[in-house]
Every structure is written in C-alpha cells, then in structure tokens.
Image (cartoon, rainbow, N blue to C red):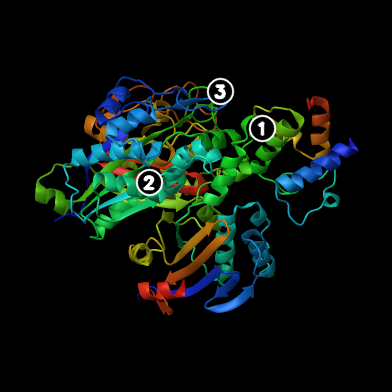
C-alpha cells in the first residue's frame, strides 16, 4: 500500500494544481478537506474522476466521497478494496 | 463630483505597470503560463487558489490584486465590477473540448469545466475581496471605452455603487492584455474615451 | 409623463413550443418537454434526460430560410427564431432605425459547431468557416444582420443569469434615454461541451427534475431562446402600442462564495431580491407569484429556499420552478422565465412546479402543485448563475 499512497499523493498534487507542494509535505493521515489541505468540492469531483479513470471505481453519489477522501490512508484503503484496474 | 480614474494596472508584453509605473518585467520569451506565475510570485499574492484557476481568472486576479492590495481597507463594499473582453474564456473552453474529444477515453475535468464561463473571473474577484456587489461581463469585438464610461457612470449615478472596478481582460493563447482600473468620484485622471484609449 | 419600462413584444422557442402560443398551451396543459436526447451523439445519451427541441439543425435552417452555406450555430438559429417572433409581436420596424438595440446573451455561442468539426478542422476546409463564429459576439452579430438591427448591439456572458442581466442592461439604456426600444434576452442550444461539463460536476439527474423536493437529484439541461422587446413609455404611447406588461424592478449581486456552488444562506440571492424590491419601490408582500430559479440541484434549491424565507419573512407567496417543463436553458433561462412570468400576469395563472412529492426538511416551503387561476399583478423572477452571479426581476401589470 505504500506504493499506492505515494502514487496518490503525486496524482493529487498534479491533478489539483497543488503548486509548491511535494509528496513529503502530505502525511498519510492529514485531513484532505477544509482545514487540512484545504481541498474543496470541485477537488472532490476531480478525485472521483481519478478513482474512475485510474482505478476503475465508479462513484455515483458525490456524497460518498466525504468518507473515502478523508485522508490518503482512507483513500488507499478504499482503492485497495475496490479497484478493478 | 464626476468619476475619475483613481488607479490603473496594465499587464501586457511581459510587463506589469501600476499607475503608469513599470513594476515588473518577465523573462521576455516565456509563455503566458510561466509569465503569470512569475507575476504571482513577484508580487507575493499569497492566494493558493490562484494555481487552480484558468488563465483568464489568473490574469483577472493578478491585475485586480496588484490594483487593490494597497487599498485593502478602503475598498468600498459596494464596489461594482465591470469586465469585458473579446475572446471570452476560449483557452479553457478548448482545453475542456479537448478532454471530451478523446472517444472512449474521454474524461471531462470538473476543475476545468467550472472555468468555462468568462464571468467566473467576476466570481473569483468577489470571493477574494468579499464583494457582494453588482457585476457583469460583456463581450465586444474590441475595447469599448464609450460603453464602459456610460455603464460605469450610470452605476454610481444610480447609487448602485460608490466605485467601479472596470477592466478589459483579454487572453487568447499567448496573447494577453489586462487593463484594470477603478473609477470613483475623487481626484484622478479624467474618465474619458481619449484617456482610456491612451492608458490601455 | 411616467417613464415606465414597457414590454411590447415577446418571442420564445423551447422544448415545449416553437413560439409563445405553443409554450402557453403546454404550460396550461401540464405538457412538459423532458425526454432522452435524440439529436446529439453523446455517450451520455441513455443516461440523462433533457429539454430538447425536437428539430434538427436542418429543420431550423429551413424555418429561417437560411442558405445551405451559413455560419449559424444551433444556438444562434434558436435565437434568430425567437428574436424574429419578438420583433413581429412588438410590430417594430428595424430597417434603418439606429435607436433599436439588441442585448443578447449566450454561454454556448458557436461551440456546438466547433465541437462537431474540431477534430478535423485542419483537413476539412469546408467546415473552417465556423471558426469565425465560435465566439459569443459573432453569433449575436449574425442575428443582428439577419434581423436588420442597426443600433447598439452587445453580448452578455454571465452563465445562468445572462438573460436577466441583458434585460437589466436594456432597461437601463431606455431609462438613460440611450435607446427607445431594445430587444433583450438569451439563447443556448444543447451540445456535448455543456452536457459533459455538467455531468462531471455530478449535478445532472437521470430522472425528471424535482425542484424543491427532499429527494431532488439534480437538473435536466434544456435548450431554447427567448426575447422581450423593452420600450420607453414615450415611445409606445407615441405609436399607440398597448404594452404586455411592465418591468418594475431589477438587480444583480454576487454571492462571493464559490465558482459554481451557492452559499448556504443564499446571500447573493437574498441581496439580488432585496435590491430588486428597492428599485421597484415595492414591498415583498406585493408579490403574487415567484418564478424561482429552482434547478433541482441539492445546492441551489436549499440556498434559494433559505433566501426566499428570509426576504419574505416566512410568508413566501405562491412559487414554482418551470424548469420541469423546459429543463435548464442556461443563458436563455431568465428570458424564457420572463416570458412565463408575463404569461402569469396576462392570464392570471400560477404555473405548477411539476414532479414535486416531498417537502425539503430544512424549511416549510411547498411549491405550487397545480395550475391555479388567481389575480396575478406582480411577479418576481429569479436567475442565479455560476460565478455567484445572482439576478432578480420584477414584472407588473
């Protein structure tokens, strides 16, 4: 899962234009949204696209994202359990 | 008192001017993306959301920030925003179009799509400076000083706004020209067509 | 003499009719225009429902009598048809008349043509002429030329509030004496650009849109065009034309919250409505019917609902969203709904908000569920666009 977590951090930095941030700056348990990394609802939608495009997981309700995208840790766990790619 | 231009900012040809004084010069041959990043860093705009914006919004935020930074506490809460350009938001429109033209592998990007309207620039400025005032975006063949003068003046005359942030914010690939100015019934440069054409 | 802003003509095309009479008949007969997409080849064809006008581009060209080689996009053809009806209805002659203006609005412009031919623009020279009219402004120019409009012409692009802002600009130009008559409104045709974009924001519904319903899932996109002819009191009295209605209030404010979502309390919406009442010199209690923006997205209806409860001090008048009939026609929405607001005044009718089943738990607001006959003297129409752009209009008899 370590490899996946690093991959996710790289993808997030790129897809969400987190300039001035490197993989080392994001801890596995950092809260991604609101007060943590400060991601917003549009970023959540981008993450949903990544889940589909790169891991073959289709989320139909954007509200499910809240739990899954809490941190890199929760994301990696969810992907490991549900990926089809 | 009549409305006058109290401050103005120009961003074009790799240069940034405030009230006619050159404050920054980019590397010259660079593309718009690299140039505007340089502007952001040079003026310490300190607004991380900047990086998520499309080119048009970056240009609008950069020019309005440089204009408004020193006036932070004196910005009228009812300052209206009046922007215009020729090319709307064509750059990000084409990016979006590209992303949905990949056949089976098409994935539209929400972060792109939200910017495919020129008036999002109005929204971004309003969010940054907490303005809930009147705002509009007009598309013209070219810079239309007569229209801007009439419209901006009518806003203050009708007491809809105490001042107006006006701008011609044009971006088309690597051709960019931002001319932002504030008009207010205070001392400043006369708000006439001749002067606007000189200053842009 | 008073200097009211009169509406002396209207024109409209939407999924529920190709002209004003057809639209009114559909509204009265509860006949909505929401269905699966037929004319666009998109991967989302079987997934979503839209308010599509069941005419191919070829059929629209025939209606307008356009030559085979023309630069009209679907949006501008819809615009030309509706604007033509409005001018005819107002009985104005555009020829050589430079005091007739045209304030148009669109979000799509020529994009529907560009997306069809984008991939091989370089090879297929015969499609390259469409590149010239991609931008919003050129589409407006095409319509001006077609209709012989010679006065002031401009295009507004502020998303879903565009047409309301066009109406507002027109009113101001008349009030300032710049123009005597002005055609104002908006147009937008369906295209993959918009369909895919909204889909990626996950705010489209796979079922019929249910504004203000607890279980609403999102919006149905629509297409259409609608225009009003605004005229000064001096002008319509001089030529003896009886107005259809009057535009009494109009305002615009920014929500200053997010690029595409609305603030929780609907601040921008509240400010726009409040300002519109100030301009009209009217009190909220004087409104008989509210044509809401009501897109049926979880976000809009919550924030608009809150704003209405606040502005009307808990005594919200009869209200409905007509988007279950037409879908969300984007830039045209405000002018389509302006036409419906004027129908309400002239016919003394309140139109239903179709598909409503269950009240939202956040407040006690029940939209109009049946067509109702009652005295309607003042209507408030809301249109809230992306970018926090909120506009409200007030029409009176």
Tell me, yes or no, whether the two marked residues, 2 and 3, touch with CB atoms within 8 Å: no
Residue at image position (50%, 39%) is: C124
- How far across and down, in percent of the image, does residue A53 sit? 71, 33
Q: Quadrant location of residue A48? A: top right
Q: Disc 3 on helix, strand or loop?
A: loop
Q: How far apart are marks 1 and 2 (CA)?
A: 31 Å
Foreground residue, B177 or A28?
B177
**Residue bearing the label numbered 3:** C47
Q: Which mark is residue B105?
A: 1
Pointer 1 indicates a residue of which chain? B
Decide: is A65 above or below C129: above
Pointer 3 indicates a residue of which chain? C
**Residue bearing the label numbered 2:** C139
Q: Distance between the residues labelled 1 and 3?
A: 18 Å
Tell me, yes or no, whether the two marked residues, 1 and 2, touch with CB atoms within 8 Å: no
Mark 1 neighbour density, 10 Å: few (under 14) some (14–19) many (20 or more): few
Q: Is residue B128 left or right of residue A50?
A: left
- How far across and down, in percent of the image, does residue C8 sit? 20, 43
Name the front one of labels 2 and 3. Answer: 2
For the question of whether residue B185 can be seen, the reply is: no
Decide: is C74 above or below C277: above
- How far across and down, in percent of the image, does residue C196 sit? 56, 34
Residue at image position (74%, 47%) is: A14
């Amino acid at each position: 899962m370590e490899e996946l977590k690093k991959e996710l951090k790289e993808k997030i930095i790129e897809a969400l234009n987190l300039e001035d941030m490197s993989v080392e700056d994001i801890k596995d348990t950092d809260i991604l949204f609101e007060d943590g990394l400060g991601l917003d609802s549009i970023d959540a939608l981008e993450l949903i696209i990544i889940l589909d495009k790169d891991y073959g997981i289709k989320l139909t309700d954007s509200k499910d994202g809240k739990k899954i995208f809490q941190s890199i840790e929760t994301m990696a766990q969810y992907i490991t359990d549900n990926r089809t790619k | 008192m009549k409305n006058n231009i109290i401050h103005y900012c120009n961003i074009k040809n790799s240069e940034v001017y405030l009230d006619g004084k050159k404050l920054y010069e980019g590397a010259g041959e660079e593309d718009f993306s690299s140039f505007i990043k340089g502007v952001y860093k040079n003026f310490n705009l300190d607004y991380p959301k900047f990086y998520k914006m499309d080119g048009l919004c970056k240009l609008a935020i950069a020019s309005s920030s440089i204009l408004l930074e020193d006036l932070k506490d004196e910005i009228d809460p009812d300052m209206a925003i009046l922007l215009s350009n020729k090319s709307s938001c064509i750059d990000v429109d084409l990016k979006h179009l590209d992303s949905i033209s990949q056949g089976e592998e098409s994935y539209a990007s929400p972060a792109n799509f939200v910017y495919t309207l020129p008036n999002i620039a109005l929204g971004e400025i309003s969010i940054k400076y907490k303005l809930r005032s009147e705002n509009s975006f007009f598309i013209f063949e070219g810079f239309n000083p007569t229209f801007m003068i009439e419209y901006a003046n009518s806003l203050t005359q009708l007491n809809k706004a105490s001042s107006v942030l006006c701008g011609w914010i044009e971006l088309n690939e690597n051709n960019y020209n931002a001319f932002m100015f504030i008009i207010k019934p205070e001392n400043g440069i006369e708000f006439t067509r001749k002067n606007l054409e000189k200053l842009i | 003499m008073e200097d009211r802003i009169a509406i002396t003509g209207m024109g409209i095309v939407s999924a529920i009719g190709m002209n004003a009479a057809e639209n009114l008949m559909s509204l009265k007969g509860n006949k909505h225009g929401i269905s699966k997409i037929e004319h666009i080849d998109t991967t989302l064809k079987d997934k979503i429902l839209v308010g599509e006008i069941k005419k191919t581009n070829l059929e629209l060209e025939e209606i307008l009598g356009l030559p085979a080689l023309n630069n009209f996009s679907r949006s501008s053809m819809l615009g030309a048809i509706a604007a033509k009806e409005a001018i005819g209805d107002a009985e104005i002659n555009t020829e050589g008349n430079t005091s007739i203006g045209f304030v148009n609005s669109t979000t799509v412009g020529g994009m529907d043509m560009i997306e069809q031919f984008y991939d091989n623009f370089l090879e297929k020279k015969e499609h390259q002429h469409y590149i010239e009219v991609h931008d919003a402004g050129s589409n407006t120019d095409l319509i001006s030329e077609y209709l012989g409009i010679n006065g002031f012409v401009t295009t507004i692009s502020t998303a879903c509030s565009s047409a309301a802002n066009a109406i507002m600009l027109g009113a101001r130009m008349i009030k300032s004496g710049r123009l005597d008559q002005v055609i104002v409104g908006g147009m937008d045709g369906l295209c993959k650009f918009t369909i895919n974009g909204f889909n990626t924001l996950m705010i489209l519904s796979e079922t019929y849109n249910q504004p203000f319903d607890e279980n609403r899932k999102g919006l149905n996109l629509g297409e259409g065009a609608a225009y009003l002819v605004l005229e000064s009191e001096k002008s319509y009295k001089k030529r003896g034309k009886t107005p259809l209605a009057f535009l009494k209030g109009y305002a615009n404010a920014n929500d200053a919250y997010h690029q595409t979502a609305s603030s929780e309390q609907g601040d921008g919406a509240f400010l726009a409505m409040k300002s519109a009442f100030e301009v009209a010199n009217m009190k909220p209690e004087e409104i008989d019917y509210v044509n809401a923006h009501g897109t049926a997205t979880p976000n809009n209806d919550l924030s608009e609902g809150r704003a209405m409860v606040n502005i009307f001090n808990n005594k919200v008048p009869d209200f409905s969203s007509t988007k279950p009939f037409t879908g969300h026609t984007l830039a045209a929405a405000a002018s389509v709904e302006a036409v419906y607001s004027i129908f309400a005044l002239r016919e003394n009718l309140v139109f239903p908000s179709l598909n409503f089943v269950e009240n939202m738990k956040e407040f006690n607001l029940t939209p109009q569920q049946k067509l109702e006959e009652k005295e309607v003297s003042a209507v408030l129409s809301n249109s809230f666009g992306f970018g926090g752009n909120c506009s409200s209009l007030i029409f009176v008899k």
